[in-house]
Image (tube, helix red, strand yellow):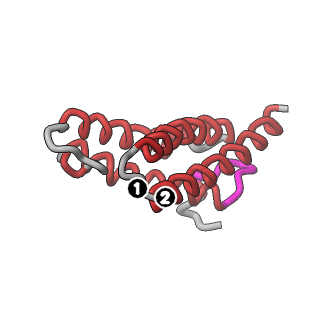
Amino acid sequence: MNMAMKPFKAPGIPYWITVFAAINVVVGCVLGFGALFEPTQALDYVDGADALGRTWGGRNAGFAMALAIFLKHPAAYTVAFAGAAFRDVGDLVNVLVERPFELAPLIFVTLLLGIILSAFIASFTQARSASA
């Protein structure tokens, strides 16, 4: 295993989940800190919503940092991916009610939610067996 990934790899968690989590950390920090310091950089920014943009940035940066710090045990992966699933369910609802309706965001969010739920199930299964 790559020595750079070893500190972030929890026992029993598949490698693809660790890589997916690491990608979430990098993307969350870049987008989150970007929006925190420049709210117009937030995805789907609306003119005049600077406070919302900073809040979005702080939420994403905080989630990414927590993910990076605590991914040493399968239970941490379970909690992190549960939070990500709820975040993306909110994004899915937003895509469904947005007008005009667009198919591409629906496909993207649905695929991302599927990957997150798969990672959640795998980490939950590993956390349960580790605690037994």
Instruction: Please name the residue shown 30% across and 42% down the image.
Output: 57
On the rendered image, what quadrant is the C terminus found in? top right
Badge 1 density bin: few <14, some 14–19, many ≥20, Cα 10 Å: some
Total residue callouts: 2
Circles 2, 1 touching at the beta carbon (< 8 Å): yes
Residue 2 vertical placement versus 72 (above, below):
below
Instruction: Please name the residue shown 83% across and 38% down the image.
Output: 129
Residue 16 image point, x, y percent: 64, 61
Horizontal arrangement in the rendering, residue 27 relative to residue 8 (left or right): left
Q: Secondary structure at mark 1?
A: helix
Where does the magenta region start and end?
7-15
Quadrant position of residue 72 = top right
Badge 2 density bin: few <14, some 14–19, many ≥20, Cα 10 Å: few
List the single residue furthest toward the left.
48
The amino acid type, in three-letter code, at marker 2 is Ile
Residue 17 image point, x, y percent: 63, 55
Residue 29 image point, x, y percent: 36, 50
Horizontal arrangement in the rendering, residue 64 relative to residue 124 (left or right): left
Q: Nearer the viewer, residue 69 or 116?
A: 116
Residue 80 vertical placement versus 102 (above, below):
above
Q: Secondary structure at mark 2?
A: helix
Q: Disc 1 marks which residue?
A: 27
Q: Disc 2 marks which residue?
A: 23
Cα distance between the residues tagged 2 and 1: 6 Å
Instruction: Please name the residue shown 29% across and 49% down the image.
Output: 44
Q: Nearer the viewer, residue 39 or 58?
A: 39
* Residue 12, numbered label: none
Horizontal arrangement in the rendering, residue 81 relative to residue 33 (left or right): right
Q: Is residue 8 magenta?
A: yes
